[in-house]
Image (spheres, helix red, strand yellow):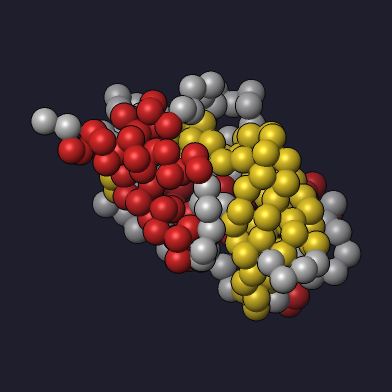
Amino acid sequence: MTILTRENLGNGSFRSHLAMPEHASWTDARLDQSFAETWAQRPRGPVWVFGYGSLIWNPLMVFEEQRTATLRGWHRSFCLRSISGRGSPGQPGRVLSLLSGGEVQGVALRLAAPTARDEVRLLWTREMTGGSYVPRWLPVQLAGGGTVHAITFVANTEHPQHEQDASASTVARLVARARGVFGPNIDYVLALDRALREHGLHDPYIEAIMARMREASEAP
């Protein structure tokens, strides 16, 4: 099992560990172009990143401030098929993305100005290797007051790994069996549930998936 670290993101070995099919993996040039285009559109002021999944419990970024935050107009969905990180081609898993509608609670990370560009570029290697997300600067409401625009990765619904059925029952069934280079898919869901509770955050969808997983484990 491979552990995701700043080192393997920075030296490029992260991508070799994933061993994605060529058609599902972006080139360095395409990554650089995507990053440059999004970075050029950043709003004035501090750079914020909104995390709603693994960025909550394993951000791997140097940041100066962390605040719980709410993003309106989007909701969590395990609609992204994982064929390497948390699954395999023969036994695909599921990982998180965001679909339009509703709202989602997560964490907002404020990056240090001198290193913000490098930190976001590192984040691009982590999140945009296969083009399964669309990066957007979206307004998030910080706990305690205030709104900032944070880089947020939402679903690319045209991507070949995007799945229409992301119901709690379907996700619970798939993640129970799948595993990839980063370990069992179920560990991803358990880490998410734990991180949300530690931050005092609430998501009925994640709670429904956890309930389905418990029911399956208790079945005779």
Between 11 and 178, the one nearer to me in the picture? 178
Q: Is residue 121 visible?
A: no
Q: Residue at x 35, y 58 (%)?
A: 3
As drawn, is 178 to the left or to the right of 122? left
Tell which residue pokes out farthest to the right in this image. Answer: 44
Q: Residue at x 57, y 52 (%)?
A: 52
As drawn, is 24 to the left or to the right of 103? left
In the picture, residue 144 is in which quadrant? bottom right
Q: Residue at x 67, y 39 (%)?
A: 102
Q: Quadrant of the C terminus?
A: top left
Between 183 and 169, the one nearer to me in the picture? 169
Residue 95: % across, % down: 46, 40
Between 13 and 206, the one nearer to me in the picture? 206
Q: Is residue 46 above or below residue 151?
A: below
Residue 145: % across, % down: 77, 68
Residue 207: % across, % down: 43, 44
Q: Is residue 5 visible?
A: yes
Q: Residue at x 31, y 44 (%)?
A: 186
As drawn, is 132 to the left or to the right of 135? left
Between 44 and 65, the one nearer to me in the picture? 65
Residue 189: % across, % down: 38, 47
Tell which residue pokes out farthest to the left in this image. Answer: 220
